[in-house]
């Protein structure tokens, strides 16, 4: 998938009158055609014009910036938070939880298996 396809999926979902859209979007940053930052900007503009409902957008990235740098950068570009990749989530927080607190990046690191002696 690419950023343009992500925008198209959001718009198509809203065409179905029985749906109110997505509650949360996890947007990969590095995609072909249109990257996640540009796609997020397009979606945020549509939200500001009330063309689509307000939706939580979270960045997913495997870049090497430090956690604090990522958080500042992604919030400045319209994301509410980010998930480092690879990431395995054990629980699915509600969008409300994500908007008020930050999931520690340690939650996405692989846990080491304990050795049985």
Image (cartoon, helix red, strand yellow):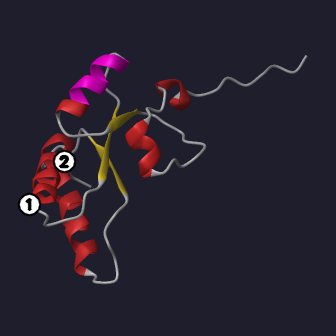
Residue 80 visible to an observer of this rendering: yes
Mark 2 packing: few (<14 Cα in 10 Å), some, or many (20+)?
many
Which SS does the magenta portion mostly show?
A: helix
Give the magenta part as a residue range.
67-74
In the rendered view, tell whether residue 18 sits above or below residue 55: below
Q: Which residue is farthest bottom?
A: 17
Q: Of the residues under marks 1 and 2, which one precedes in the sequence?
A: 2
Disc sitting over residue 49 in the figure: 1
- The residue drawn where x is 51% and y is 47% is 93
Of the 4 image quadrants, the one containing the C terminus is top right
- Residue placed most toward the observer, 31 or 101: 101
The residue labelled by disc 2 is 40
- Residue placed most toward the observer, 100 or 68: 100
- Residue placed most toward the observer, 112 or 49: 49
Residue 24: % across, % down: 36, 54
In the rendered view, tell whether residue 99 sits above or below residue 9: above
Residue 116 falls in which quadrant of the image?
top right
Residue 45: % across, % down: 10, 53
- The residue drawn where x is 55% and y is 42% is 89
Of the 4 image quadrants, the one containing the N terminus is bottom left
- The residue drawn where x is 48% and y is 36% is 87
């Amino acid at each position: 998938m690419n950023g343009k396809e992500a925008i198209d999926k959001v718009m198509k979902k809203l065409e179905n009158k029985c749906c109110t859209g997505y509650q949360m979007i996890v947007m990969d940053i590095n995609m072909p055609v249109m990257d996640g930052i540009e796609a997020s900007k397009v979606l945020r503009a549509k939200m500001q014009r009330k063309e689509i409902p307000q939706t939580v957008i979270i960045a997913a990235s495997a870049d090497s910036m430090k956690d604090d740098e990522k958080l500042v950068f992604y919030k400045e570009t319209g994301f509410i938070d980010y998930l480092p990749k690879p990431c395995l989530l054990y629980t699915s927080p509600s969008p409300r939880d994500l908007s008020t607190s930050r999931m520690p990046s340690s939650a996405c690191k692989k846990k080491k298996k304990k050795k049985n002696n």
